[in-house]
Amino acid sequence: MDCQPKRNRGNLPPVSPTPKFVAHQNESDTSMFRDSSDGLLMGNIEVAGRSNGFLYFHSPCFDGIVSAVLASDFLETQRRWKIDRFCAVDYGAKATWLSQQLHEPCCVVDFIYHPQATFWADHHSTTFLTPEARADFELRDSSNTVLYDQRFGSCAKLLWDRLAGSLGYRNPRYAEMVEWADRIDAARYATVGEAILGDAPALRIRASLGFQREPDYFEHLVKEMRSKTLEEVADSSHVIEASRKVQARIRAGLKRFKVSAWLEDDGIAVFDVNGTGTVISRYAPYYIYPAARYSVGIVRSEFGAKITAMRNPWSEFHSVPLGTIIERFGGGGHERVAGLLLPPERAGEARSILKELISAIRAADTISEPVGRTA
């Protein structure tokens, strides 16, 4: 079965498919709702008499993969689902996401809210693309079929806590994966060296995502991690080969980054680097400039121009809302890290967007000092 969603109603958001519910309670669960039209148990997220499900997850992203592991384990072992396809999605799909007709039933994790998702979980502050999407979520918020909290550093940790707290399920075999997903996605590394050159099993798997970028590989990792430990997956030949190649490219990227970046007087590390043939780590600014407060820059490649903004995760200060700020330019993310991908035909706009983005961060930052060199 094809993961590619079908277009729906041109570029307009789809009509909300949220069903009309009638209360259905029993002694063990007072938050259960039944769709009287097709027998779908929403509170219990059980599928009866329906086709097998699809699971859409954010990738290349270690948190998205672990979130897919947790969600599929819960749905298949506890709610009678059978996941036919694991479909990787990335923010290049943002512009048309709400106009896509998803497979039903489906689960979406670590990605933008979609009204057709039978089960959905996310932690990004920019997940609701329209007021109508947020309103649809709010109609379903008490049903335990949509899980959202932007205070979580990772979607995996959100699922880990909410599945146990609200739905009474936790599989302890995934505890280490969740710990690493939260550390990686929330940038809670012990040092910048661990973030860039760390060799723990989870970090080798994460590194492999920078080389193996085919959707089939992400789906393969989800299935492997369902039944194997991080160490077993990291010791597989495809992860070893890919992670070694990525580490070599990261070291080459650090050398190239060093001559393409500078530090502003107010502590913003700025860069405009051609990443072709290398890997430019988002932590590279803090490897070169440990005292930088923010990093904002462009990484160029044959795929276009990626603009990223990040606050120093090893410094304690109140961050401006980077995800909200970069959303104005068509991107998204978290309070502390955000990004925007411009396709090749728009790569020429990157430098002007970078200037505007730096200005917006400075305007929101109450402790900025006078600036030196500008982008």
Image (cartoon, grey):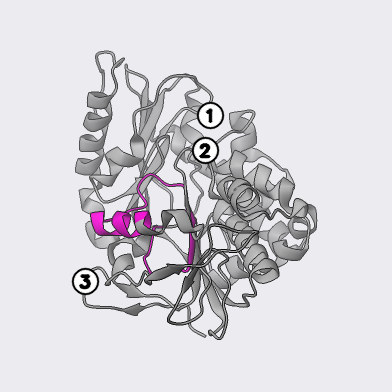
Residue 49 is a magenta residue: no
The quarter of the picture where residue 16 lies is bottom left
In front: label 1 or label 3: 3
Percent across and percent down for residue 274 are 39, 47
Q: Which residue is mark 1?
A: 287
Number of labelled discs?
3
Three-letter amino acid code at disc 2?
Answer: Leu
User: Mark 3: which secondary structure?
Assistant: loop
- Residue 287 vs 85, above or below: the answer is above
Label drawn at residue 254 = 2
Query: In this view of the protein, can residue 331 be seen by the observer?
Result: yes
* Alpha carbons under labels 2 and 3: distance apart: 41 Å
Check disc 3: other Cα within 10 Å, few if <14, some if 14-19, many if 20+: few
Location of residue 235 by image quarter: bottom right
- Report the magenta residues as a range: 112-138
Vertical order, 309 against 84 (above or below): above
Q: Which mark is residue 11?
A: 3
Measured from the top left, where is residue 41 in percent x and y? 53, 71
Q: Indicate whether residue 137 is drawn in magenta.
A: yes
